[in-house]
């Protein structure tokens, strides 16, 4: 029997409801450069206020994509989930090379596989909290040797456990190359969710990924307000018309103070189920909004 792995345990896919497929609630890149200060979201009370607004818009599930060395904090995710009564899915695996911990370079592929399996089977970071998705990533227009090693390990772990794979495509580059590398190592395209694909301005690349069976994530929704979301909706409409409605996902990837209303930013975690949903429903219809934010996540995150 398939189930979805949240920070509070297993749930049925039917309990997921409206889902944001790539967000950051408690996050802090472990690099000293000052430019990352804006990316540190460490206040649990502020984040609970933010999540509360998401919940008021009928939001039910958030996929927390902060990996090791980027400030992952499973206990705090569980605390938010309990306080706000929502589902949170968190991740094992790794970010792109820039954000990798030392150990990712040193460990062999087999060591990495064992490490990820340990997290999936027994819990992460000294807790009993298990991940519900595996992350891997690639650099801008490039896949480094270490990223290849991690992708191969992620593929193997997926084959052994069924846990789905959700990726970081830096600024929307290397989507096809990254996806094909996972496929070459035994992962079916339907179990791969390519991330940040809306940053890729060439719609033909997104369509090609869909043709090959990959899921793709429009996850910069609301990042640049005004006309940009009209463009996202127009592209999603084309992708649906081409028959790919079952492979699309939505999120805001709002892992920065600038995007979180509780930290003084915008548009905030309630944007997609509020302003964006209204536009989407007007242009494309409610049926497809629900498919993309409820049905597709339910299928993908159940294993
Ligand atoms: Zn992210």
Image: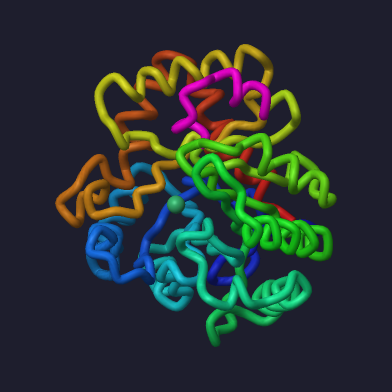
In-front residue for pair 114/129: 114
- On whether residue 198 falls in the magenta region, the answer is yes
Work out whether 185 lies above or below 246.
below
Magenta region, residue range: 197-209
* Left or right, residue 186 beside residue 193: right
User: What residue is rendered at 53% in x and 56% in y?
Assistant: 96
In-front residue for pair 288/258: 258
* Left or right, residue 133 beside residue 127: right
> What x and y, as percent, mark residue 204?
59, 18
> What x and y, as percent, mark residue 98?
46, 60
> What x and y, as percent, mark residue 62?
47, 54
- On whether residue 281 falls in the magenta region, the answer is no
- Name the chief secondary structure element in magenta: helix
In-front residue for pair 151/221: 151
> What x and y, as percent, mark residue 116?
68, 72
Work out whether 207 lies above or below 98.
above
């Amino acid at each position: 029997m398939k189930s979805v792995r949240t920070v509070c345990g297993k749930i049925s896919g039917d309990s997921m409801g409206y889902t944001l497929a790539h967000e950051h609630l408690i996050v802090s890149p472990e690099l000293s450069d000052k430019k990352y200060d804006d990316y540190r979201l460490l206040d649990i009370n502020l984040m609970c206020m933010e999540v509360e607004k998401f919940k008021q818009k009928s939001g039910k599930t958030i996929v927390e994509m902060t990996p090791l060395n980027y400030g992952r904090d499973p206990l705090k995710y569980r605390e938010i989930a309990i306080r706000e009564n929502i589902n949170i899915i968190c991740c094992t695996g790794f970010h792109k090379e820039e954000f990798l911990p030392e150990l990712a370079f040193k460990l062999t592929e087999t060591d990495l596989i064992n490490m990820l399996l340990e997290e999936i089977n027994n819990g992460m970071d000294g807790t009993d909290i298990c991940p519900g998705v595996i992350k891997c990533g690639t650099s801008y227009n490039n896949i480094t040797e270490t990223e290849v090693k991690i992708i191969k390990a992620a593929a193997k772990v997926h084959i052994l456990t069924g846990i789905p794979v959700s990726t970081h495509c830096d600024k929307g580059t290397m989507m096809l190359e990254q996806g094909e590398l996972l496929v070459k190592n035994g992962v079916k395209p339907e179990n791969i969710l390519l991330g940040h694909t809306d940053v890729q301005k060439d719609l033909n690349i997104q369509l090609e990924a869909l043709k090959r069976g990959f899921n793709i994530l429009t996850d910069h929704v609301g990042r640049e307000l005004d006309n940009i979301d009209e463009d996202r909706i127009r592209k999603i409409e084309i992708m649906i018309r081409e028959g790919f409605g079952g492979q699309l996902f939505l999120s805001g990837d709002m892992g920065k103070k600038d995007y979180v209303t509780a930290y003084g930013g915008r548009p905030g975690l309630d944007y997609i189920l509020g302003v964006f949903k209204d536009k989407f429903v007007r242009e494309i219809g409610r049926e497809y909004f629900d498919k993309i934010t409820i049905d597709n996540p339910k299928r993908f995150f159940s294993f």
